[in-house]
């Protein structure tokens, strides 16, 4: 019963943080970060890319943004046109295809929690299945004799399909755990350095 309680608590936490990551709309920067109509018109009318870059750099220097690239262009408020939702996202980190949303200032916490709970969930599944994985391949002679005396077919309990299911579940849980461990570790490192993936 305790295993089921922990399993369902982790499952509910994963579903909740996934839901929040998907349905929390990205916040757009305030009006002070938007280009003025005159600057936008000047930028759009210019055909030469190097002059367009100069116009953007000039506009970026006026913005109240402290994190900039080497040439003065702000990197935290990027225009991203993957979806209509990802117009201009405040502190955008990336567009995540798994949650089908732009991860930025408003939902980055839920995304990190989703990764953390998924990591714990995979570890929990692998840990609870591991003892059955070991049990299927290391059976003592006494246990086989006990099953023989009870007229229970050991072959029925340890058939190839059940071994395959346990092996598959363990392999998938470990595979996702390792993948999520690197992804979660990378995002924790980014948070510790106040950086984004862009």
Image: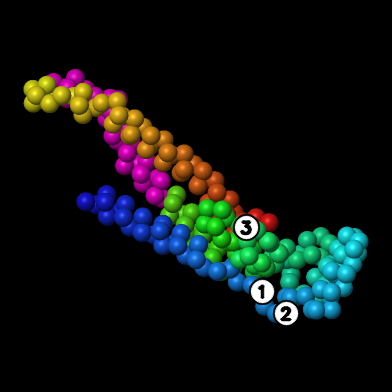
Identify the residue shown where x is 47% and y is 65%. 20
Looking at the image, can residue 85 be seen?
A: yes
Mark 2–mark 3 CB contact (< 8 Å) = no
Q: Secondary structure at mark 1?
A: loop
Badge 1 crowding class, 10 Å Cα cut-off, few under 14, some 14 to 19, many 20 or more, is some
Q: CA distance from mark 2 to mark 1?
A: 8 Å
Examine the rendered structure and indicate whether residue 98 appears above or below residue 67. Answer: above
Which residue has dot 1 on it?
Answer: 29
Task: Give x and y (percent) for residue 179.
Answer: 51, 43
Task: Answer with left or right where residue 4 lies relative to residue 32.
Answer: left
Query: Residue 74 lies in what quarter of the image?
Result: bottom right
Cα separation between marks 2 and 3:
23 Å
Marking on residue 94: 3
According to the picture, the residue beneath numbered tag 2 turns out to be 32
Q: Is residue 54 visible?
A: no
Distance from label 3 to label 1 (Cα)? 16 Å
């Amino acid at each position: 019963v305790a295993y089921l309680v922990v399993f369902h608590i982790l499952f509910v936490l994963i579903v909740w943080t996934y839901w929040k990551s998907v349905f929390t709309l990205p916040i757009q920067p305030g009006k002070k970060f938007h280009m003025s109509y005159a600057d936008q018109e000047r930028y759009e009318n210019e055909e030469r890319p190097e002059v367009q870059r100069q116009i953007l750099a000039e506009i970026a220097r006026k913005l109240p943004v402290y994190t900039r690239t080497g040439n003065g262009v702000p990197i935290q408020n990027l225009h991203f046109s993957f979806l209509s939702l990802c117009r201009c996202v405040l502190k955008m980190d990336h567009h995540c295809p798994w949650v089908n949303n732009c991860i930025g200032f408003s939902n980055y916490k839920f995304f990190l929690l989703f990764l953390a709970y998924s990591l714990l969930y995979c570890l929990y599944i692998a840990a609870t299945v591991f003892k059955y994985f070991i049990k299927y391949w290391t059976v003592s002679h006494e246990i086989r004799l006990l099953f023989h005396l009870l007229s229970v077919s050991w072959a029925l309990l340890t058939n190839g399909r059940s071994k395959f299911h346990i092996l598959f579940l363990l392999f998938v849980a470990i595979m996702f755990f390792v993948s999520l461990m690197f992804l979660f570790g990378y995002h924790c490192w980014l948070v510790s350095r106040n950086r984004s993936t862009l």
